Amino acid sequence: EPEVTQTPSHQVTQMGQEVILRCVPISNHLYFYWYRQILGQKVEFLVSFYNNEISEKSEIFDDQFSVERPDGSNFTLKIRSTKLEDSAMYFCASSFLTGGPYGYTFGSGTRLTVV
Amino acid sequence: QKEVEQNSGPLSVPEGAIASLNCTYSDRGSQSFFWYRQYSGKSPELIMSIYSNGDKEDGRFTAQLNKASQYVSLLIRDSQPSDSATYLCAVNRDDKIIFGKGTRLHILP
């Protein structure tokens, strides 16, 4: 069964450092998403991406965040200057259609720890 | 008003019984509704989707949707210990899915 692949599974970084989280969506999917889940809290939408541009972003997705699809297969989330409160599980997801009529397939996540 | 509301639980159900999970949503424009299962430390896994009023059955799972009441539910029949997890209700809004906080389900052996 096709799956969304995320690397690394765990990243520890110092406050103020830049991190890049990587995702390989399912190959025939057209819509890509990043979500985050702070420990014990709900899964929160960060950003959606279609046709090489952001289609929607949440209030969480401020100027410190950026996304890119550099080579037609990878989908990355960059946090420019990490803060302690960025510590969370980050999930990449993809779907064939927007709005998720068939739901999204999630990757296994990257646990980001900012120290 | 929270967009997707669920009772956080925990909901404890004896093995073999029916587990009933409920969810309400605020946006009447939502058209697609989902139930995801999330084990501790793992990613959400889609188990059911529903778009029309009424019931949708898939194996031991039945999703129920009532758009007039803005209510979605999930029934798990013959509950198994492996069903112990957090169940996330999710609805589409614009071009994204938004999640409730989830209900922790504990199946008692």
Image (cartoon, coloured by chain):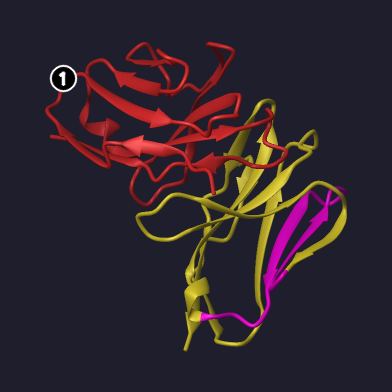
Chain colours: A red, B yellow
Vertical relation: B107 (above or below) B21 = below
Q: Position of residue A23 (x, y in %)?
A: 39, 30
Badge 1: chain ID: A
For disc 1, the marked residue is A16
Q: Position of residue B94 (x, y in %)?
A: 69, 26
Q: Position of residue A87 (x, y in %)?
A: 26, 36
Q: Callout 1, which amino acid?
A: Gly
Q: Nearer the viewer, residue B22 or A98?
A: A98
Residue shown at the point (16%, 20%) measured from the top left: A17
Residue shown at the point (59%, 38%) measured from the top left: B98
Vertical relation: B107 (above or below) A74 = below
Q: Nearer the viewer, residue A102 or B65?
A: A102
Highlighted range, magenta: B59-80
Q: Secondary structure at mark 1?
A: loop
Residue shown at the point (41%, 23%) measured from the top left: A74
User: Does residue A54 appear to the left or right of B40 in the view shown?
Assistant: right
Residue A8: quarter of image: top left
Q: Position of residue A41 (x, y in %)?
A: 41, 47
User: Is B64 colored magenta in this rendering?
Assistant: yes
